[in-house]
C-alpha cells in the first residue's frame, strides 16, 4: 500500500481502479528486416487492430457526442484504409528492408509535410488526420495502449500529470468517479471544474503518475487531499464508511434548499453559484443557488477549433438567463489566458502567461472577439436579470474603454431595432491588487465588485496558482488579503454599491465567518458548496463576526487568524 499527500481539490471519496491518462512512449529504432513478407503482415495486422479500435470509438462517439463529433473518426478510418498511403508503406518495407515502424513514420511524415504546405485549409486538416492515425497504428506495432478517455466503460479513477479544463469537461461522470494529478492547485481550473461536476479530486500529488499503474485500486480522499494506492481491505472498509457519512451529511444540508440565507441575527446574504456552462444550471437549482455569481464564459470558447459564433453565444446566454428565471446572473466576459488556452487563436507563447496578454487585455486589443460576445450578451439581456462583469481590470482606463465598447454595441443594436434591457448592471472582477487598492475610485463608476480571490491571492503573494511547490502561499486568511477584501467591500458600500466574491475563498468554511463580518453581500461558489455554507451562516451571528473580523485584521499571521476563527465559531 502506498500513500500520497496532495491538495484536496474537490470533496468526496472515490474508490475504483486507476486509468492512466498518460501519453505512451512511441519511440522506436529503425531496423533492417530480412523477412519482409512477415513484416508486411505485421503491418497489416496493426492496421486491422487500429480499424477495429477506431470503429468502436466512432460508434461510441455517435451515441455520446452526436454524429457531428463522430465524423472526425470517419475521416480517420478513411485515412487508415487508404491504399495511396498504405501501398507506399508496404513497398518501402520490401524495397528498403526496414521495419514497419520506420516505413510507416517516413511515409506518413512525407505526406504530412506535403499537405501542410498546401494553401488549403481542408488539406491541412488531412495532415492532422494522418498524424493521428499514424500514432494509432504505431501504438499497435509497438504493443502499447493509446489513451482513449472517451472509451472508458467502467468505473475508474483518472490518473494524470495534469488535466486541462477541456480534458476535465470531457470526463464522463458516469464512469469517472474521481481523479488525481501530479500538478495543480486548489484554484487551478481543473480543480474548479471537478467541484462543479462533483467529482472527488486530489491534485498536486507530484508523483501520482509515477506511483500508480493502470488497474491499481485507488482511494481518492477529496476531503483530506490523500490518495491511497492498493489499500488494505480494512482501509477500503473504513473509507466506505466515511463515504456514507459524507452522503448522510449532504442529505441534512439538502433540507435547506429552498431557504434564504440568513444569519442567526437575521442578516441576509446572497449565496450564488459559479458555473462554466449552461449544463451546470441543474446543479445550481438542485443546490438552492440564489443566483449565478460567476458564469465563466471562456469554456464556450474551449475544446473546439474556432471561435463560437454570436448566435451560439446568444443561445448559451439566453439558456442561462431563462434557466435562472429572474434571479441575478453575472456573466463574465472572456477571460482567456493563464491556464485556459485557446490554441486556435495562435497567440505567441509567453514566459509568464498569468501576467501576460489575457482576459480584458486581449479583448480590448482583439475587439472583434469582444464585440461579438457583447452583442450576444446584449441581445440575450431581455431573457432574465443580466449583469456583465469584466475580468482582470487593472486600471480605470481599461474599465472605461471596455464600457465604451459595450455602449457602442448597445447603441448600434438599438438603432437596428433590437430590444436590449435597460437595467444591465456593469461590474468588474477585483483580482489585481492595484484595483483593490483603488477600489474607492472604481466604486464611483461601477455598479458592483466581485472579488476574484483565486487571482487576487496569487498576485498579492506572487505565487503561481498552478504551482504546488508554492501552494502554501495560497493564504486566503492572511491579514494582508483580508485587509484588501475589506477595502473593496467598504469602498463599494461607501458609494451604495454591492460587493460579492467569486473566488474559491467565498465557499471556504474558515473564511465565511470573516467575510460575513466584513460585510460581504454576495458569496459565489461551486454549487456543491452552497448548502453547506447556508447551514454554516444560519448558525453565525453577524454582530459577533464583525468583532472577529476587526480583531483578525490586526493579527500578524494566517495561523493566528485560523485560531481566532476556530475559537469564535466552535
Ligand atoms: C478568480 O480569479 O478568483 C476567479 C474567480 O476567476 P478565475 O478562477 O476564473 O481566474
Ligand atoms: Mg481570475
Image: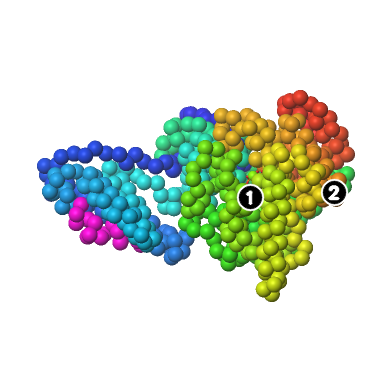
Residue 357 position, x and y percent, is 57, 45
- Residue 346 magenta-highlighted: no
Can residue 34 be seen here? The reply is: yes
Label at residue 495: 2
322 relative to 550 in the view: left or right: left
Horizontal and vertical percent for residue 446?
A: 77, 52
Q: CA distance from mark 1 to mark 2?
A: 25 Å
In percent of the image, x 18 and y 39: which residue is there? 31
Looking at the rendered image, the quarter that the C terminus falls into is top right
Report the residue at 81% width, 28% height from top: 554
**Mark 1 sits on what residue?**
360
Return the residue nearer the eye: 299 or 250. Answer: 299
The main secondary structure of the magenta stretch is helix
Q: Give the magenta range.
A: 74-89
In the rendered image, is residue 452 in sight? no
Q: Quadrant of residue 319?
A: bottom right
Circle 2 Cα neighbour tier, 10 Å, few/some/many (<14 / 14–19 / ≥20): some
In what element is the residue under mark 2?
loop
* Residue at the (39%, 42%) spot, across then down: 23
Amino acid at each position: 500500500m502506498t500513500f500520497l499527500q496532495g491538495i484536496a481539490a474537490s470533496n468526496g471519496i472515490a474508490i475504483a481502479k486507476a486509468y492512466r491518462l498518460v501519453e505512451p512512449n512511441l519511440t522506436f529504432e529503425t531496423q533492417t528486416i530480412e523477412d519482409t513478407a512477415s513484416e508486411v503482415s505485421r503491418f497489416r495486422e496493426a492496421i486491422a487492430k487500429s480499424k477495429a479500435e477506431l470503429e468502436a470509438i466512432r460508434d461510441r462517439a455517435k451515441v455520446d457526442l452526436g454524429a457531428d463529433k463522430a465524423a472526425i473518426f470517419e475521416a480517420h478510418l478513411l485515412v487508415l484504409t487508404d491504399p495511396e498511403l498504405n501501398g507506399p508503406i508496404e513497398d518501402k518495407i520490401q524495397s528498403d528492408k526496414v521495419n514497419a515502424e520506420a516505413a510507416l513514420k517516413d511515409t506518413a511524415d512525407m505526406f504530412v509535410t506535403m499537405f501542410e504546405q498546401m494553401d488549403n485549409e481542408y488539406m491541412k486538416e488531412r495532415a492532422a488526420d494522418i498524424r493521428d492515425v499514424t500514432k494509432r497504428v504505431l501504438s499497435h506495432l509497438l504493443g502499447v495502449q493509446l489513451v482513449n478517455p472517451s472509451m472508458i466503460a467502467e468505473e475508474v479513477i483518472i490518473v494524470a500529470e495534469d488535466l486541462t479544463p477541456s480534458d476535465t469537461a470531457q470526463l464522463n461522470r458516469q464512469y469517472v468517479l474521481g481523479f488525481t494529478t501530479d500538478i495543480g492547485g486548489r484554484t487551478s481550473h481543473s480543480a474548479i471544474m471537478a467541484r462543479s461536476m462533483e467529482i472527488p479530486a486530489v491534485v498536486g500529488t507530484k508523483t501520482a503518475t509515477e506511483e500508480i499503474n493502470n488497474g491499481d485500486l485507488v482511494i481518492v480522499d477529496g476531503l483530506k487531499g490523500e490518495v491511497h494506492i492498493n489499500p488494505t481491505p480494512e482501509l477500503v472498509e473504513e473509507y466506505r464508511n466515511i463515504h456514507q457519512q459524507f452522503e448522510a451529511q449532504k442529505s441534512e444540508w439538502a433540507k435547506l434548499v429552498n431557504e434564504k440565507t440568513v444569519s442567526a441575527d437575521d442578516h441576509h446574504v446572497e449565496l450564488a453559484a459559479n458555473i462554466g456552462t449552461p449544463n451546470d444550471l441543474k446543479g445550481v437549482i438542485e443546490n438552492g443557488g440564489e443566483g449565478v455569481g460567476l458564469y465563466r464564459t471562456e469554456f464556450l470558447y474551449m475544446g473546439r477549433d474556432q471561435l463560437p459564433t454570436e448566435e451560439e453565444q446568444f443561445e448559451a446566454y439566453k439558456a442561462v438567463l431563462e434557466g435562472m428565471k429572474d434571479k441575478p446572473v453575472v456573466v463574465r466576459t472572456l477571460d482567456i489566458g493563464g491556464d485556459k488556452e485557446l490554441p486556435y487563436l495562435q497567440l505567441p507563447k509567453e514566459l509568464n502567461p498569468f501576467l501576460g496578454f489575457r482576459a480584458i487585455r486581449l479583448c480590448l486589443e482583439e475587439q472583434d472577439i469582444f464585440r461579438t460576445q457583447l452583442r450576444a450578451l446584449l441581445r440575450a439581456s431581455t431573457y432574465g436579470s443580466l449583469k456583465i462583469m469584466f475580468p482582470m481590470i487593472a486600471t480605470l482606463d481599461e474599465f472605461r474603454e471596455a464600457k465604451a465598447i459595450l455602449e457602442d454595441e448597445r447603441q448600434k443594436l438599438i438603432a437596428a431595432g433590437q430590444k436590449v434591457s435597460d437595467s444591465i448592471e456593469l461590474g468588474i472582477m477585483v483580482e489585481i491588487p492595484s484595483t483593490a487598492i483603488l477600489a474607492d475610485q472604481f466604486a464611483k463608476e461601477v455598479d458592483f465588485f466581485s472579488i476574484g480571490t483565486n487571482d487576487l491571492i496569487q498576485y498579492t503573494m506572487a505565487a503561481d496558482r498552478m504551482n504546488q511547490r508554492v501552494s502554501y502561499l495560497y493564504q486566503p486568511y492572511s491579514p494582508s488579503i483580508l485587509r484588501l477584501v475589506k477595502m473593496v467591500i467598504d469602498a463599494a458600500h461607501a458609494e451604495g454599491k454591492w460587493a460579492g466574491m467569486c473566488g474559491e475563498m467565498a465557499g471556504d468554511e474558515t473564511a465565511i465567518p470573516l467575510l460575513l463580518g466584513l460585510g460581504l453581500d454576495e458569496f459565489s461558489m461551486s454549487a456543491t458548496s452552497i448548502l453547506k455554507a447556508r447551514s454554516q451562516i444560519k448558525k453565525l451571528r453577524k454582530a459577533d463576526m464583525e468583532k472577529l473580523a476587526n480583531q483578525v485584521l490586526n493579527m500578524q499571521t494566517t495561523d493566528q487568524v485560523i485560531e481566532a476563527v476556530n475559537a469564535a465559531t466552535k
